[in-house]
Image (cartoon, coloured by chain):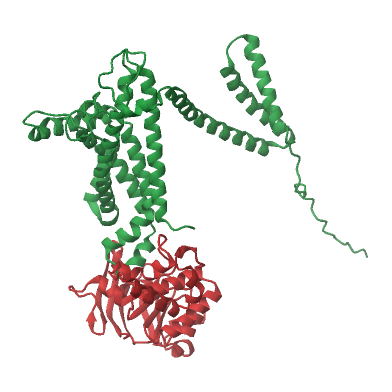
Amino acid sequence: MAKRIEATNVTAYYGGFKAIENISLTVEPKTVTALIGPSGCGKSTFLRSINRMHEVLPGARVEGSLTIDHQDIYDRDVDVTAVRRMIGMVFQRPNPFPTMSIFENVVAGLRLNGVKRRSILEEAAEKALRSANLWDEVKDRLGKPGAGLSGGQQQRLCIARTIAVEPQVVLMDEPCSALDPISTLAIEDLMFQLKDTFTIIIVTHNMQQAARVSDRTAFFSIEKTGDPGRLIEYDHTQKIFSNPSQKKTEDYITGRFG
Amino acid sequence: MTTTVTTHRPRPPARPVTLRARRLPAYAAPAVALGALLAAAGIVYGAGIGGPVLVVVLAALLYLVGLFVAANAVEGRRSARDRTWSALIHSAFVLAVLPLASVVWTLVSKGAERLDGNFFGTSMNNIGARDANGGAYHAIVGTLEQVGIATLITVPLGLLCAIYVVEYGRGRFAFTIRFFVDVMTGIPSIVSGLFVLAFWVLIVSPWFNDGRPSFSGFAAALALSVLMLPTVVRSTEEMLRLVPAPLREGAYALGVPKWKTILRVVLPTALPGIVTGVMLAVARAAGETAPVLLVAGGGAAINVNPFENNQSSLALFVYQQAGDASKYSPARAWTAALTLVALVLVLTIAAKLLARRNRLGR
């Protein structure tokens, strides 16, 4: 099910500003890949270019090639919504739809894409909520508003919402940065389970988190403010954190940077 | 040998460390108010320069001064300023509410006289200057139809326009639209009436009417929708901009197409605000007299067909009755004005309840 993502010379712009330059890396199926690096180095930009969320902003564009199982997602004939259904995304701040109940939030992706059968929706909602470790906490109040949950529950609701559409790949943009340590742990546990089914790419500022959850780690950096972000090193997480081949990576990981 | 031992004595604190301060007693403010009132009454009636209104105004000023002096003497300058400003703000609130309360009271007290079944059940057809009865049935029908049709025209158009400007519009074209919507906000209602008179009544309506121009309630609805459109567009635009971008992105990331995101996520989130804006526009349209007079012509008889012949409206009815040479017409005008206000109030409350029903209970 899960798919391989290959990026070749990906360069992304915001209007005239080049945010990342010549990023090339391959993400293996059913692994967790962490993107780390200082603020403004283009991790999030790269992540958002993988499911074509980058171009949502006016003036933003991407060059280079990004393929998912050898299909170029930036091909002219590609349907953006199909790409995003295949590559789901969890955002930094939980963003449940405020007018929808917990149940409606989870099945929003299915329902808004035309699934109407109540039985199918209910089944999908329970499955997604169970996968997100949220079912037991919300099963008695599925009709209550999603915005009434705690921050950590909201984020798991958003994860449930993302995996309910059965994507191949799940992108996570600092999913724990707005959460307390206990909720963070819950979501990290969740990532371990989810990687049996999905390919996961996570942006994080928390290096312990990257070391804990990921199989591979990509380190991004910039020379100075205004320069485009570049991929410095990409390797097995163990190697990056114990014996990185680049000086810059070592400096960053040991805290001698920025 | 002498050794000098220097000891650092703690410096005395610049201010007393206690958290307590002298406060005016609770009865001080009412006492100052009472004193100000008595003093003002003494001055005004003693000098014989005015009536109770001047007493109240003077008392308010004396109260502000007295409160400042008293607080300054006991509590200090900062607290005196604080008390004076909060007293000023409260008086501003009272000043703002007074006219409103006065309007409501006048409407209710003067409008109650003709608040009977006859008023709501009959029209002004064949009612002469000496007839005490007569009613606004035709005007109520006219207002409901004209405002209803105008709302039906304006809301879809205004929503689509605002959605275009916020979600799709880029560059010069969207900017131009926004600019002209702003300009339209300032159009006097008589101008919109003249526009519809020249365009619809004189040019278009003869096509449906054997070559003769015809007044109609629909023409009034057109003129009202010209007035409503900018209000609806601007308020909807502001509400759509308030919907956080992460909500849109959340929907996009689920593979939901943009139009469906707008329809199912953005619009429901902004709905309560949009409804408020629409109701402001409806209230404004319901109170317009000039366009209705120009293009629907007014009329004394009941005409439920908005597409043919003259129609009246409540606002126009008020205008005509207020100027009519009959001792019974002012009472009709007041009752019609009360009806108009009540109608707008009921519509607004209904719309808000309807918009809230969609929201989930907290």
Horizontal placement of B141 versus B88: left or right?
left
Horizontal placement of A126 versus B170: left or right?
right
The x and y percentages for residue A172 are 40, 75
Q: Which chain is red?
A: A
Toward the viewer: B248 or A256?
Answer: B248
The x and y percentages for residue A66 are 26, 79
Looking at the image, the residue that sits furthest to the right is: B1
Toward the viewer: B321 or B185?
Answer: B321
Q: How many marks?
A: 0
Q: State the quadrant of the N terminus of chain B.
A: bottom right
Q: Quadrant of residue B286?
A: top left
Instruction: Answer above or below: position of A70 versus B218.
Output: below
Instruction: Answer above or below: position of B166 versus A80.
Output: above
The x and y percentages for residue A160 are 41, 74
Residue at the image position 23 percent from the left and 84 percent from the top:
A70
Residue at the image position 35 percent from the left and 16 percent from the top:
B132
The x and y percentages for residue A56 are 30, 65
Instruction: Answer above or below: position of B305 versus A94.
Output: above
Asked whether residue B216 is in view, the answer is yes
Instruction: Please tell me the colour of chain B.
Output: green
Q: Quadrant of residue B320?
A: top left
